[in-house]
Image (cartoon, helix red, strand yellow):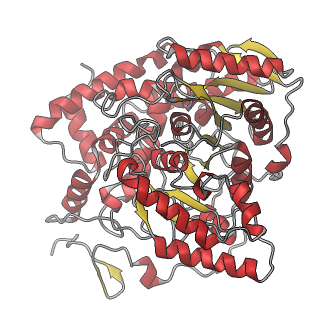
Amino acid sequence: MSLYEKTAHELHELLQNKEISATDLAKDLFARIEEKENSINAYLETNKDRAISSAKKVDEKIAAGEKISPLEGIPCAIKDNICTKGIRTTCASKILENFVPPYDATVMQKLNSQNVVILGKANMDEFAMGGSTENSGFKITHNPHDLERVPGGSSGGSAAAVASGEAIFALGSDTGGSIRQPASFCGVVGMKPTYGRVSRYGLVAYASSLDQIGPIARDVTDCATILNAISGRDEMDSTSANAPVPDFTQSLKSDVKGLKIGLPKEYFVKGMDPEVEKSVRDTVKVYEGLGAEISEISLPHTEYAISAYYLTAPAEAATNLERYDGVSYGARVNGADVVELMTNTRTEKFGEEVKRRIIIGNYALSAGYYDAYYLKALKVRTLIQKDFTDAFKNVDVIIAPTAPTAAYRIGEMISDPLKMYLQDVCTVPLNLAGLPGISVPCGFTQNKLPIGFQIIGKALDEATLIRAAYTYEQTKNLANKIAG
Amino acid sequence: MKVTEKDIKTVASLSRLRINEEESGEVMEQLDRFLNYVENLQSVDTSKIEPTTYALPMQNVFREDEVKPSLDRELALSNAPLKEDGYFKVPRVLEE
């Protein structure tokens, strides 16, 4: 087994026991990147010298006999909407093509304090708007399980890098499913933590009330380890949760006896791929066999979630993206006066989907339409949240598909944005309600495409999600298979 | 069609995006199809429902008003498309 195929917890043992060096590990990952990157395009930027120089510091520490932390020396990919000091951060947008952040996001400060090795910045849909990574302003990422297919999105580069062995783990961000759906398409584990669990300081804002950073990993153990590293209250993000952070690795226990699992009938939607449905229902049987109590539940406002999401998120985006004006940072296209300069810059440098969402957002917020669209969406959001509150009176977790299909073909959906939005039906309700969700691999289609299922939990109860996900993973042993 | 050409002009101007005449029809049609798509919200009775802007309960956060080190001026200007004497530079805003 090559080093790039291993998980972070396996590599940690090898590093600590001096069986491998962090430098050799970083070199092994770059050999893999050189082998695979031409066909996958997971990265917007990589830097071997930088990675090896970080790895050398870890080796010096180990040589000095010091104990290293769980992610120390572990090579990772960072989604390109997370600010990395001194490393170009573009959001896959031409408008930020040359932007070099003068500061680190809080999650990067936390990871850097553990001396992770940053391999590079991962491709994504521009400003995280999309579910296929086809909206990147720079390149199209290919699914490592089938190069003709999308890796999902918007964290498609992050998921593809982890799945192909081009990174051991990655950070992504999830506004409407952008961690969980690509994790399911690429056959890896991806978690959207509770809104507020992880600081958003330094995450380029798309929809601030929905955005959340989270881990993408080869298995649940790594997912728990990364969540430990990045969680916590941050004075730089007033929306971060002021709640104690448990040690999530304590939840890596194989035990779901008596766990009450709800199956929301509204999530098994018309048009869902029968292979996906069967795989998720088989997964539920596994839980039943392990002593979990299964019951069907109803989340009656699910059918309104997409509409509520696609009004709320663009409205917030239209406001957040006002800052790209060609004045203080980012690209500038000159004009005769300041308004023309701003208009030229934005018209020329934003991609189609970003412009579409800005138009929708500003329309929904504009005088005369605010009550009918934006305010209405926020009220329906209340009802969607209440559905979950009611359901969690009777169950501990909810299990559902992550996405209604496995990975689709590149180009298949891109011309029909409304059809593409429907893909988000199982993921957006959690963002609206602020709840945590984890996507775990549960099988393959006949075409050998990965299928993922989703475990949804109560606010701040990631620990139970990790226990439930770990139990399944131990039983089925599906995680940690490198693609390609 | 719900969306008018005037709506598109207004929204484009609010968005600081240029939509020329050829594009205007297509944008109008796209926005119209989108509004039909989200029309199902109107059938939900929300007369007694409060809006949710943040999913978790939020309250005002207070802190001491202390001077702390902030971004160095040169660093803050390091991504500026155009700068001069420690300032961002833009075309003339005020008329003579």
**Residue A189 vs residue A295, the one in the foreground:** A189
- Residue A35 lies, with reference to residue A186, above or below; the image says below
- Quarter holding the N terminus of chain B is top left
- Residue A60 screen position, x and y as percent: 69, 82
Q: Residue A3 appears in which quarter of the rendering?
A: bottom right
Residue in the foreground of this view, choosing between A180 and B69: A180
The residue drawn where x is 30% and y is 22% is: B33
- Residue drawn at (74%, 16%), measured in percent from left and top? A285
Q: Which of the 4 image quadrants contains residue A143?
A: top left
Residue A173: x %, y % from top left: 54, 48
Image quadrant in which the C terminus of chain B is located:
bottom left
Foreground pick, A159 / A65: A65
Where, by quadrant of the figure, is residue B53 drawn?
Answer: top right
Give the number of marks.
0
Residue drawn at x 68%, y 14% as measured from the top left = A298
* A82 relative to A330 in the view: left or right: right
Q: Residue furthest right?
A: A258
Residue A364 x, y percent position in the rendering? 39, 34
- Residue positioned most to the left: B22
Q: Nearer the viewer, residue A261 or A484?
A: A484
The picture places residue B47, in percent across and down from the top left corner, at 58, 19
- For residue A132, above or below residue A76: above
Q: Residue furthest front?
A: A1
